[in-house]
């Protein structure tokens, strides 16, 4: 039978230490070490607040802050390495602080619980990560805009149901992803406000009898406000779920683009060529060049979705207030942050240097299908033919062309006029791919004028800080 672990820093309520297997099961130090610098930051603010309100002396607060700063330095230099015996990052810091400054270190936890402490740390962490991800989204948008700038008049087949639909400006296609990323950026900004609320001072669940100043510690930590209810403050994880939901949407958008890149790089499409910097080969087939980056992004998206589900299920049955289940919020959150940041970085690099659009192939592709059929109907409508009548007529034309292995551009003027007397010589210009795209100049459309305007507007949005 395993011997018990050394006794922890619990109250005299406990007569013996944890079983070593239970101690390991309980411990979170292996992953919540990620919060160490945020724990130090929150503790420094708490110490200063305790001094401001007279709960401890100014000299004691200075000792505490100096000790916490020394721990920060030791950690950065690799000298402070908590182990499983420390259980979690909060006890690890407290134990080391007492070693450094003596009994005054035991005063730091006055008017504070681990419940509001960990809630504070995780919000400080997530606030920083949101700022980083929003910066990455801007870089991703810029990479898309750089490609779009080069390809305003490059024509690409547009699809619905993965069937050829209508030709598009390639820039217009890329700008759709700029819009998705803009919503992601705005969504994270909105969530940041709800992340940036301080639970410090809520105590274990009921507040504290000490005359603390929650607004002051919140101000020191640059929080926008404090939780109005102590029960809510220690048990709320809405902000983590909201972030993970927003992260899931970011990866939805990245994965959609990744899927298109994978298709475009195939021999069947041939719309892009992958460069050596973002692709690998096969261990057995020497001719292969594999789209590893978009495939990994597509695969990693599932794990982000899984983390969202994990957090939702964790929270759905928890009674007030704090429960140990909440320890399980960190690994999904941390991995979501790492995964989204990695995917954004990889897709940005892919856009910047990992692919080359094959403009000759694209130009040839849009001349070999019936994606200009709607423009024939539109042409007749401008000549006074009711659109539904024109639509049915063009369907008949396409059927005849398919039977005769012709395209619309191959029909003679006599054949056009035999179908309807409204057709004139200008039908050929009207159904040319460049004109088909240029004609769609309604706001938000793929017309070249609209695309240039959209590019200009998108570049201005990237300059907005908030």
Image (spheres, rainbow, N blue to C red):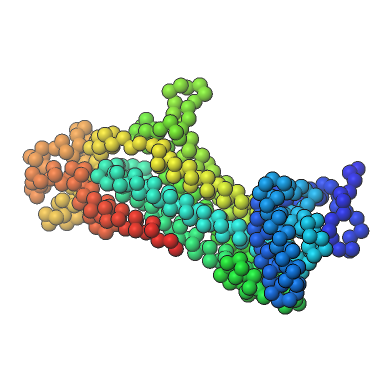
Q: Say which of 45 and 14 sits in front.
A: 45
Q: At which x and y percent is residue 55? A: 75, 74
Instruction: Check the image and name the residue furthest to the front.
Output: 59
Q: Is residue 11 visible?
A: yes
Q: Say which of 1 and 462 sits in front.
A: 462
Image quadrant where residue 36 sits: bottom right
Q: How many marks?
A: 0
Q: Is residue 461 above or below residue 156?
A: below
Q: Is residue 172 above or below residue 288?
A: below
**Quarter of the image with the C terminus in it:** bottom left
Residue drawn where x is 75% and y is 72% of the image:
57
Q: At which x and y percent is residue 303? A: 57, 46
Image quadrant where residue 107 sits: bottom right
Q: Is residue 387 left or right of residue 30?
A: left
Residue drawn where x is 53% and y is 63% of the image:
192
Q: At which x and y percent is residue 319? A: 71, 66
Q: Is residue 241 left or right of residue 321?
A: left
Q: Is residue 262 left or right of residue 21?
A: left
Residue drawn where x is 58% and y is 54% of the image:
308
**Quarter of the image with the N terminus in it:** top right
Q: Say which of 454 and 146 sits in front.
A: 146
Residue drawn where x is 47% and y is 60% of the image:
187
Q: At which x and y percent is residue 139? A: 43, 50
Q: Is residue 31 visible?
A: no
């Amino acid at each position: 039978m395993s011997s018990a672990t050394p006794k922890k820093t619990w109250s005299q309520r406990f007569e013996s230490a944890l079983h070593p297997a239970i101690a390991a099961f309980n411990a979170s130090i292996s992953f919540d070490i990620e919060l160490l610098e945020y724990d130090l930051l929150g503790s420094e603010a708490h110490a200063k607040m305790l001094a401001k309100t007279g709960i401890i002396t100014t000299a004691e607060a200075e000792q505490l802050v100096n000790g916490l700063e020394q721990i920060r330095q030791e950690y950065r230099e690799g000298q402070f390495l908590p182990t499983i015996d420390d259980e979690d990052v909060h006890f690890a810091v407290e134990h080391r602080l007492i070693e450094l400054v003596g009994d005054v270190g035991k005063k730091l936890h006055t008017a504070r619980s681990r419940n509001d402490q960990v809630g504070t740390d995780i919000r400080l962490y997530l606030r920083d990560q949101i700022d980083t991800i929003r910066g990455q989204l801007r870089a991703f948008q810029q990479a898309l805009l750089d490609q779009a700038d080069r390809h305003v008049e490059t024509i690409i087949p547009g699809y619905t149901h993965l069937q050829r639909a209508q030709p598009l400006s390639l820039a217009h296609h890329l700008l759709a992803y700029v819009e998705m990323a803009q919503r992601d950026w705005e969504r994270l900004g909105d969530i940041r406000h709800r992340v940036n609320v301080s639970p410090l001072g809520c105590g274990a669940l009921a507040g504290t009898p000490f005359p603390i100043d929650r607004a002051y510690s919140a101000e020191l930590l640059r929080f926008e406000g404090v939780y109005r209810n102590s029960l809510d403050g220690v048990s709320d994880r809405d902000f983590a779920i909201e972030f993970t939901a927003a992260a899931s949407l970011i990866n939805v958008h990245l994965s959609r683009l990744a899927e298109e890149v994978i298709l475009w790089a195939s021999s069947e499409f041939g719309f892009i060529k992958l460069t050596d910097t973002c692709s690998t080969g096969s261990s057995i087939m020497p001719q292969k060049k594999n789209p590893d980056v978009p495939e990994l992004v597509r695969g990693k998206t599932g794990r982000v979705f899984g983390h969202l589900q994990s957090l939702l299920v964790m929270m759905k049955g928890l009674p007030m207030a704090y429960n140990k289940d909440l320890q399980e919020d960190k690994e999904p959150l941390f991995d979501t942050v790492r995964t989204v940041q990695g995917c954004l970085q990889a897709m940005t690099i892919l856009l910047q240097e990992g692919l080359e659009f094959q403009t000759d192939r694209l130009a040839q592709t849009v001349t070999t299908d019936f994606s200009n059929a709607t423009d024939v109907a539109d042409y007749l409508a401008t000549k006074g033919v009711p659109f539904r009548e024109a639509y049915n007529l063009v369907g008949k034309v396409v059927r005849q062309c398919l039977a005769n292995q012709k395209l619309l551009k191959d029909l003679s003027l006599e054949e056009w006029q035999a179908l309807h007397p409204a057709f004139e010589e200008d039908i050929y210009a009207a159904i040319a791919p460049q004109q088909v795209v240029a004609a769609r100049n309604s706001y938000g459309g793929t017309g070249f004028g609209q695309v240039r305007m959209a590019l200009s507007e998108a570049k201005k949005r990237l300059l907005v800080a908030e």
